[in-house]
Image: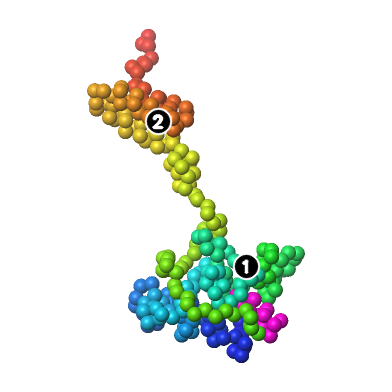
């Protein structure tokens, strides 16, 4: 999407047209050389190895999700009015897309749609990306006056370059504040099933019981310690495992 230079500042033109996450030519032999930082003062994209000379400049971290560039809403709001631009939550932080994304079909039914590219949106949003809002303002307001903010300080986030700024589908779709790890005995994704843990520990205690003369006492202590946290079904399983084998039964001879 092309913008008129008379209405759009240079830093914004470059930001919306730059190709991020390409390998840095200057540091092509280095590891993690993807250009995922944008310097607003120099109007250029940088890789982590290019940062030292730009530490005092305004730096914007570019993140990536499903091959499209996004930035944190908090950072974008310091530069431009982001009202009515649809945001997405990931890792308890909201992000917005820089540019509109290609659509596989142009069918438009009932619902809420982007005022620029007709992408389906949630209420009450009107734009799917920053570039779509800028395009709309240029068409309807004939400029960006009153929508751009003066930002004199924009440091990189403290998180640095963990995971290279990449976002997995799980991270974007996972609601903020959710926790997959459950307590022991719940059988959840991150939890430990009480029955599985009990059976494993019971096997260890059986071996100890055979090796020690006080095996019966050890087995009793084990069952008492686990009884408050485990279900009756689990106790029955341990009782069956602790039972010694009886004398083999043979068929009578005739």
> Which mark is on residue 226?
2
Q: Which residue is drawn at 46% across and 85% down?
A: 42
In the picture, the quarter occupied by the N terminus is bottom right
The answer to whether residue 236 is left or right of residue 116 is left
Image height check: is 226 above or below 118?
Answer: above
Q: Which residue is drawn at 71% across and 81% down?
A: 140
The range drawn in magenta is: 128-142
> Which mark is on residue 199?
none
Q: Decide which of 166, 102 is in the foreground and name it.
A: 166
In the picture, the quarter occupied by the C terminus is top left
Q: Where is residue 55 in the image (x, y as percent from the top left)?
A: 39, 78
Q: In which quarter of the image is residue 148?
A: bottom right
Which residue corresponds to mark 1? Answer: 86
What secondary structure is marked by label 2?
Answer: helix
Q: Residues within 10 Å of mark 1 (few under 14, many from 20)?
A: many
Q: Quadrant of residue 158?
A: bottom left
Give the mark nearest the N terminus, 1 or 2.
1
């Amino acid at each position: 999407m092309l913008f008129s230079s008379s209405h759009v500042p240079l830093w914004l033109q470059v930001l919306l047209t730059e190709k991020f996450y390409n390998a840095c030519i200057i540091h092509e032999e280095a590891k993690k050389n993807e250009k995922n930082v944008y310097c607003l003062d120099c109007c250029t994209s940088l890789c982590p190895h290019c940062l030292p000379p730009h530490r005092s400049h305004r730096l914007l971290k570019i993140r990536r999700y499903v091959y499209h560039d996004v930035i944190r809403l908090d950072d974008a709001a310091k530069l431009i009015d982001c009202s009515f631009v649809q945001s997405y939550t990931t890792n308890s932080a909201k992000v917005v897309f820089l540019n509109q994304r290609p659509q596989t079909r142009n069918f438009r039914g009932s619902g809420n749609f982007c005022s620029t590219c007709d992408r389906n949106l949630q209420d009450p949003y009107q734009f799917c990306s920053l570039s779509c809002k800028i395009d709309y303002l240029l068409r309807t307001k004939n400029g960006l006056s009153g929508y751009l903010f003066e930002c004199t300080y924009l440091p990189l986030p403290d998180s640095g370059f963990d995971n290279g700024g990449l976002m997995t589908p799980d991270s974007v779709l996972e609601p903020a504040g959710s926790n997959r790890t459950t307590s022991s005995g719940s059988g959840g994704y991150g939890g430990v099933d009480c029955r599985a843990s009990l059976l494993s520990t019971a096997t260890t205690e059986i071996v100890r019981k055979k090796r020690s003369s006080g095996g019966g006492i050890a087995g009793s202590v084990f069952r008492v310690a686990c009884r408050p946290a485990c279900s009756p079904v689990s106790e029955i399983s341990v009782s069956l495992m602790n039972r010694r084998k009886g004398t083999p039964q043979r068929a009578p001879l005739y």
